Image (spheres, rainbow, N blue to C red):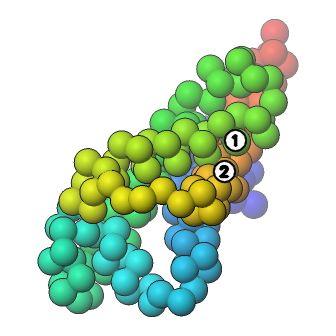
Amino acid sequence: MLIRSINKRNSKFVIILLTALLTGTLDATAALLWNYKIKAVIIFQFIASGIFGKAAFAGGANMVLWGIYLHYGIALLFTTAFYLTYPFFYSLFRNKYIVGAEYGLIAWMIMNLLVVPFSKIGRGPLHLSYVIAGMVILIICIGLPVALVADRFNSARKNKVSGSK
C-alpha cells in the first residue's frame, strides 16, 4: 500500500527517506546482533565518540541520542548518494545485486578508511574477521536495500516514459 502511494506521488525525497530509515535500522540491528555482548548504549556512545571523543562514554542518554542521530544521519547520506547514483552504477554493471554489493563495499571503505580514522575515534587495527563481517553487513543492510529500491523506482520511471511514447 505504502509503495503504491509513493509510486503515485513519485516523490524521490520520501523514497530516499524511507529507504534510509530501513537501511539505518537494518545496520543498527546488525551491529547490535554482531556485538551482542556489548550493551546497545555503549554501541551508540561509540558512534557519538566519533565527534565527542571519550567524553561520549560519560555522557549518558544524551550521547546515546547523539549516536542514534549520527547513525541515521550517515545512513541517510549513504542512501541518498547511492540512490541518486544508481543509474550510473547500473549502466556499468547491468545487475542490481552487483551494484548493491559494490555499494556495500564502498560504504565500508568510506567509513573504515576515511570517516572513522579522521574522527576522534581514530584508526584502529583491522582484523580480517571484522573486515569481512563489516563488509557483508553493509552489503546486506545498506547496499542491497538501496539498489533494490532504486532499481524498482528507476524501472517504474523508465516504464512510464517508454509506455507513454
Quarter in which the C terminus is drawn: top right
Q: Which residue is mark 1?
A: 100
Looking at numbered disc 2 in the image, what kind of residue is underneath it? Answer: Ile
Image height of 80 relative to 58, above or below: above
Q: Which residue is mark 2?
A: 139
Q: Are marks 1 and 2 in contact (CB under 8 Å)?
A: yes
Quarter in which the N terminus is drawn: bottom right
Query: How many callouts does the rendering have?
Result: 2
Picture quadrant of residue 33: bottom right
Q: Position of residue 39 (x, y in %)?
A: 45, 90
Element under disc 2: helix
Element under disc 1: helix
Q: Residues within 10 Å of mark 1 (few under 14, many from 20)?
A: many
Q: Residues within 10 Å of mark 2 (few under 14, many from 20)?
A: many
Q: On the picture, is 143 further left or further right than 165? A: left
Looking at numbered disc 1 in the image, what kind of residue is underneath it? Answer: Gly
Image height of 106 relative to 136, above or below: above
Q: On the picture, is 27 further left or further right than 125? A: right
